[in-house]
Amino acid sequence: MTKLTEIQKVRLEEVEGFRHADDDYWYRPLIFSKNLFTYVAHIPPNGEMPAHEDAHEFDTSLFMLEGHLQITYGKEVFPISKHEALYVRGGIPFGVKNEGSETASYVLTFNPPPDIASVEKLKEVYRENNREFKSAEEMNKMV
């Protein structure tokens, strides 16, 4: 029997939010490991993360917690709603848009994960690149 030597337990309400890029897509990192990365994303009404031609090379699972989104996956566009899940294969352009009146929230897990080992390291990268992040309190007000 394998004994657990490391447990990561996080409360979403206590996690800072990071702005993805020059879009209205915010995420709160939950789990960092050498094999996966998990976060909760929040897209306010009319917010989006456009699909990029330089598609990511990792596989992603998405599980909707709240709201509705329009998904762009390659050349396809389709809706996804609360309690639906989606597998996104790496190498295909992927984007999301919230055309609804409430913030859409969902869980994303990546494999392989980005090369960032902790929230502290992520905040360091964001500071070095003058990228925006919010306190947990600011994120709680947003969602």
Image (tube, rainbow, N blue to C red):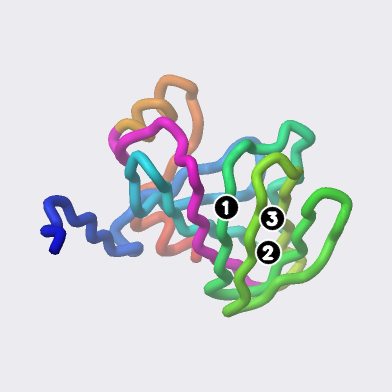
Q: How many numbered marks appear?
A: 3
Would you call the spot at circle 2 few (<14 residues within 10 Å), some (14-19), or many (20 or more)? some
Q: Amino acid at mark 2?
A: Pro
Residue at far top of view? 128
Amino acid beneath label 1: Thr
Task: Give the spatial CA distance, label 1 vs label 3.
Answer: 20 Å
Q: Relative to residue 50, is residue 108 drawn left or right?
A: left
Q: Nearer the viewer, mark 1 or mark 2?
A: 1
Q: Quadrant of residue 34?
A: top left
Percent coordinates x, y for residue 79 in the rendering: 77, 70
The residue carrying mark 3 is 47
What's under tag 3, amino acid-wise? Gly
Horizontal relation, residue 78 to residue 39: left or right: right
Q: Is residue 140 above or below residue 101?
A: above
The span shown in magenta is 102-120
Q: Residue furthest bottom?
A: 83
Vertical arrangement, residue 64 with respect to residue 18, above or below: below
- Number of residues whose C-alpha sits closer than 10 Å to that of mark 1, classed few (under 14), some (14–19) or many (20 or more): many
Residue 1 belongs to magenta span: no
- Secondary-structure class at tag 2: loop
Q: Position of residue 58 (x, y in %)?
A: 58, 42
> Which tag, 1 or 2, sits closer to the chain's start?
2
Q: Position of residue 30 (x, y in %)?
A: 36, 54
Which residue in the structure is indicated by mark 2?
Answer: 45
| Residue 105 drawn in magenta | yes
Q: Which residue corresponds to the image point at 75% horizontal and 38% vertical from the top-left?
A: 52
Residue 128 percent across, percent down from the top left: 42, 20
Q: Do labels 3 and 2 touch, CB within 8 Å?
A: yes
Residue nearest the viewer, comparing 39 with 143: 39
Q: Which mark is residue 60?
A: 1
